[in-house]
Amino acid sequence: MKTLTELLAGYQSVVLGTQGSNGYPFSSYAPFYYDGEHVYIFISSIATHAKNLQATPQASALFIEDESKSENIFARKRISLQCDVTSISRDEERFNAIMKHFQHKFDANMVTMLMGMKDFNLYALKPIYGEATFGFGEAYHIGGPKMNTLVTRSGDKGHK
C-alpha cells in the first residue's frame, strides 16, 4: 500500500483550511515539506492563515491534482488531512534541519531570504485523520502508526 511520502512527492504546495476569529473557514495555500510524519509550512505571521493557526491550532490540508492533468474534473485525485498544528521556534534544534529541506526542495536563495525575515514562522501539521480519493470508487482512509498509510475504506462510520 502506498504511503503519503510517495503520494505527496509530486506536490509543492498545500491548500490550507483554517478557522477565522469570526468562526468562518478561511482557505489559502503554502509551500510545504513532508517528512513522513508532519507537513511543515513556513509562513508569515502577517498572513491571515498564520493568525488563524495561532488562535486555533488546527487545520485542514488539501493536496489536489492540477485541473489540467485530470481526465475528469469530477474525479480529481486528492488527499485531505485534518491536522493539529504546533509552532516550531527558531531556537529549537529541528528548525534548521527542517529549513534545510525547504532550501533543497525550493529556491534556496528565496528560502534563505525568507528565513531572514523575523515574521516568518515554521509550523508542523500533524495528521489526526484524513482520506485520499483517486477517482470514482477508489477512496481510502489515512491511517497507520504515523498516520501516513492508505487504509482501504470499509464504509463511512465517521472520524475521530
Image: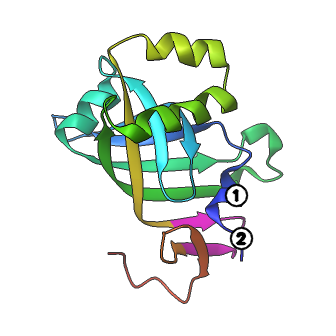
Nearer the observer, 12 or 62 = 12
**Residue 54, x across and y down, in percent:** 22, 35
Q: Residues within 10 Å of mark 1 (few under 14, many from 20)?
A: some
Q: Which mark is residue 2?
A: 2
Q: Residue at x 65, y 36 (%)?
A: 12
Disc 2, disc 1: CB below 8 Å?
A: yes
Viewer-nearest residue: 145 or 79: 145
How is the rendered protein coloured? rainbow
First in residue order: circle 2 vs circle 1: 2
Q: Please give the name of the residue rendered at 31% of the width and 25% of the height, measured from the top-left corner.
A: 48
Q: Residue furthest bottom?
A: 154
Residue lying farthest front? Answer: 93
**Residue 26 within the magenta-colored segment of the rendering:** no
Helix, strand or loop at mark 1: helix
Q: 40 or 82, which lies in front?
A: 40
Image position of 151 with respect to 34: above or below? below
Q: Which residues are magenta?
A: 131-141
- The x and y percentages for residue 10 are 74, 45
Q: Nearer the viewer, residue 107 or 27?
A: 107
Q: Is residue 98 above or below residue 74?
A: above
Amino acid type shown at disc 1: Leu
Q: Which residue is painted at 40% across and 56% down in the image?
A: 126
Q: Quadrant of the N terminus?
A: bottom right
| Residue 82 horizontal side relative to residue 108, left or right | left
Residue 23: percent from left, percent from top? 18, 41
The circle on residue 7 is: 1
Q: Which amino acid, mark 2?
A: Lys
Q: CA distance from mark 2 to mark 1?
A: 7 Å
